[in-house]
Amino acid sequence: MLKKVPCLCFFLLLFVSLFSCSSSKESRSIHNKIALRPDGRLPLIKKIRAEEGKIDFYLHDSDGKDCLAVVMHDENNKRKVVLFNRELEKTGSFILPQGKGPGELGSWIPGMGMDGELIYFIDRQKNSIEMFTHEGHFEDSIPIQDSSYSLSFGNCVVTRHGDNFYVGMTYPGSVVKTDSQFNALGRASKEKELDVEKIFESLVRYTTDASGYVYTVMLGIKGAYEIRKYDPGMNLVKTAYNDDGLNDLLSFEKCQFPDNSFEVKGGAPAISLCVKGGKLYVLRGVAGINDIKWEGGKKVFYGLPIPGLEKGFVDIFDAETLKHIK
C-alpha cells in the first residue's frame, strides 16, 4: 500500500526546485488512488519560537537553498522580517517599513516571494511590488500597470524565473506569468471576466521548477484533490486526479452572506507545494477547518480541527508524470 509522509510544519515545503523537469509524453490525465495511512507518522521537523511576535500566516518564503524569510508582528503590529537558515536557526531580521512611498507597505500585504538575491512584497495600497535585499535594504518599487489581473487574494506568491515572474493567486487568471515589469504574458486560467464562480474554481496553490513548469493544486473544485501541470508557455500538459479518502473533508466551499460578501469555508486541499529532485511535494491536512457563521449582524470565523486527523502529511508525486510515489 502507498503511504504518506508526515509533517508538522509548513516550513518543510518552502524549498523550490534545483532540477529541471520536462513535459510528459504519456497520457494527459493521471488517476491516483492513494491509501490513507494514519499510523506510522513521525515528526520530520522541529518547532521554533521567535521573540519578534506572531507569524503572519501566509507571509513566508524560501530562496530554495539556505534561507527562509517569515513576516512577524509584535503586540503593536510592528512588522519585521525574520530570517532563518535551513536548520531553522535565526540568522537576522529587519523592520518592514509602513507607509505610502517607495519601499514602504500599507496595512495589508497580500503575499511575498524570495530568491537568492531579493525578497519581494506585494503592496496592495500602491498596487506594486516592493523589493528588498536579504539585509533589509530597499532595492526597487515596480508599479503593476497591467489591469488584466488583480492581486486581491491573500496567500499570493511571487516567483522570479530569469527575467520573468510568476504571480498567484490572482484573478482572473489564477497564476499569471509576467515580464520583468509585471505585465502578463500568459495565465493558467484563460477566463478574463470577473465571474465569481469561475474565480472560485480557479483558486490554487502553485509552485514552479527550474525549467519554468508550473504546478498547481486546485482549491475551489468541491470534493477534488486535483493537480495540474503547465509548460513554460502556460499551456496545460497534464492533470492528476487524486483520491485518498479525504477529498470531501479537505475541500473548500464558497458561501455568501447577507451583506453580499463571499467567503471560503472548509479545509484546504493543500497548503503548500514545491518541486525538488524531480519530485513534487504537496503539504496536506494542516490549517484546520475554516467555518464562518453570520451572528449578530456580522461574520464570525471559527477555526476547527480536522476530524480524525491529528497531523498533516506530505504527498510525493513524480514531477514529470504526476504519478503518486508515497
Image (cartoon, helix red, strand yellow):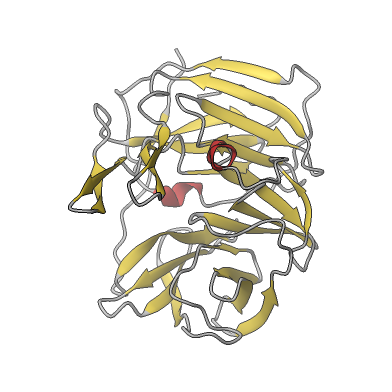
Q: Nearer the viewer, residue 19 or 264?
A: 264
Q: How many marks?
A: 0
Q: Residue 15: x, y in percent?
A: 56, 51
Q: Nearer the viewer, residue 264 or 284?
A: 264
Q: Residue 124: x, y in percent?
A: 54, 69
Quarter occupied by the N terminus: top left
Which residue does the image show at 64% across and 18% down from the upper left? Answer: 30
Q: Is residue 142 above or below residue 285?
A: below
Which residue does the image show at 47% across and 80% down from the upper left? Answer: 96
Which residue does the image show at 56% across and 28% down from the upper left? Answer: 226
Locate residue 250 relative to residue 114 in the image: left or right: left
Q: Residue 107: x, y in percent?
A: 43, 74
Q: Is residue 226 above or below residue 15?
A: above
Locate residue 162 relative to residue 17 in the image: left or right: right
Locate residue 204 relative to residue 291 in the image: left or right: right
Which residue does the image show at 65% across and 66% down from the upper left? Answer: 116
- The image quadrant that residue 77 belongs to is bottom left
Q: Is residue 103 above or below residue 221?
A: below
Work out which residue is located at the far left of the displayed protein and give it.
296
Q: Residue 37: x, y in percent?
A: 35, 20
